[in-house]
Amino acid sequence: MPASPPSFRPASPWWCALHLPQLALDAEARHRRALQAFDDALPWALTDGPQQRRVHAMNATARAQGVHAGQAVASAQLLCPGLALSAHQPVRDAALREWLAAYAYGFSAEVSLREPDTVLFEAGRSLGLFGPWPRWQQRLRDELAGYGVQVRIACAPTPLAARGLARAHDGLAVADATQLQRLLARLPLGLAGLPDDALRLLERSGFKRLGDVLALPRAALAKRIGPSVLDRLDRLVGRAPDPLPLYEPPTRYAARLDFDHPLADATVLVFPLRRLLQEFALFLVQRDGGVPGFRLVFGHEDGVAPTRLEVRLAAPERDAARLFDLARLKLDSARLPAPAVSLGLEADDLPGFHPEHRDLFDARTRSGDAGLLDSRLRARLGDAAVQALAVVDTHRPEAAWCWVDTPRTRLPVLAESPRPLWLIDPPIMLREVVEAVLAGPERIETAWWDDEPVRRDYYRLRTLSGQEAWAFRPVGGEGGPWWLHGWFA
């Protein structure tokens, strides 16, 4: 059915259903693409059941050759001799649903995974930001298709109605309750999302459309199908509220790819690493977060302990290209003790992301590039090989800095007066003739309990050679020699 016009203004709440008609196939295909082991032009199917003797799902190529769900594997192979088989992995289905929920969370704070084959999110309150709806719907389709996820989309005032209409009419957007009742009356019972036993009972009684069931007297209907199913019908049509358990973004991230065979060459691991980081970056963007560091985990066979590579960043980042660049540098400099049978990505800290504020027409190099250089050096050389300077909260100049492993983003402000970049430690007597006193005195006096207390009056001087010196005299030492402590650039 055609999409709604740009002037479309639904009532709130307004639920969008992202129905996954081929959840298992998409989950398996995404896994294979990450390993560069996918060709959808060839027939393949997923199997399950005792000893994996039944077809669970199949791609379009296998379906065209007569393979169908529930079919015995032996019969499917007779119809399609080149059929490739893989065991259905429900854990991959669950991972895809979680990924889709994280994706939807980028558009709405109200996302639900209650329905096993559909992700629901409240879209009405976000139309002003992402709408109009036809444009927003096309964006959803294009982006999800690019990530290898097939969806059927529909919107309605109730979550269950959105799910049912997505299964029946891809692209439908229902504006109000009156239109919803009319469409639901024509909805086939098999698409209404009723429990299997209630559906079989109603179909054996000759009911084919949802409207026929809703026209029955409530008392008779409740006696026939039970109060719980009647309550679901009420929530479907909007007669009763339908509170949903809402998705909460995880406080840590974990994803893993299992390889079909051990991989010993690091260059072969580059492609799955890129796919993992692309999805990780999308996860970070959708939750408006960044990551200050993450961990690559390589699984091995024969009892070999997993290999863990820590990738640390100078500042939280979420750009997929930068994350991949740092991870590859770390991988290139590492040596795996044995071929890898799996690759995992883990992140325990997911803070909010605060991009650098810049003027629109500022063409200067980003200051963040220094942080990128720090991260690249750490990835290539190791954390122990890279150190940074940091300010120490003390007034004594020669003790006001130290080496740190990680650059500090917030430094204490110890003085308002300028300080020289070139500090001489220990101070020496100034041999040059002072031409003028440019600033001072500035008294620096440490506490009496300091191990090496000082009481000095500092001045900014210009010598006959034109240099600017930072020098002091001890308190009470007026007329005495100048002690040189630094040069200004």
Image (cartoon, rainbow, N blue to C red):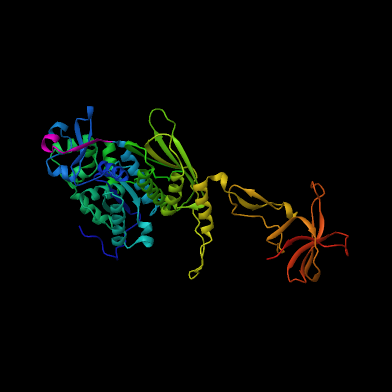
Left or right: 380, with 485 as reference point: left
Find residue 248 and report its image quarter.
Answer: top left
> At which x and y percent is residue 246?
39, 45
Which of the two residues, 268 or 6, is positioned nearer the viewer here? 268
Left or right: 406, with 488 as reference point: left
> At which x and y percent is residue 431?
81, 64
Q: Which quadrant: the N terminus?
A: bottom left
Which of the two residues, 451 or 212, is positioned nearer the viewer here? 451
Q: In this rendering, does residue 213 appear at all?
A: no
Find residue 465 and report its image quarter.
Answer: bottom right
> At which x and y percent is residue 460?
76, 66
Q: In this rendering, does residue 282 appear at all?
A: yes
Number of numbered callouts drawn? 0
Left or right: 13, with 449 as reference point: left
Vertical placement of residue 235 versus 417, above or below:
above
Residue positioned 19% across, 47% down in the render: 41
Vertical placement of residue 233 versus 456, above or below:
above
> At which x and y percent is residue 315?
52, 52
Residue positioned 37% across, 48% down in the render: 274
Q: Which residues are magenta?
A: 76-88
Q: Which quadrant: the C terminus?
A: bottom right
Left or right: 395, with 116 as reference point: right
* Residue 179 located within the stretch drawn in magenta: no
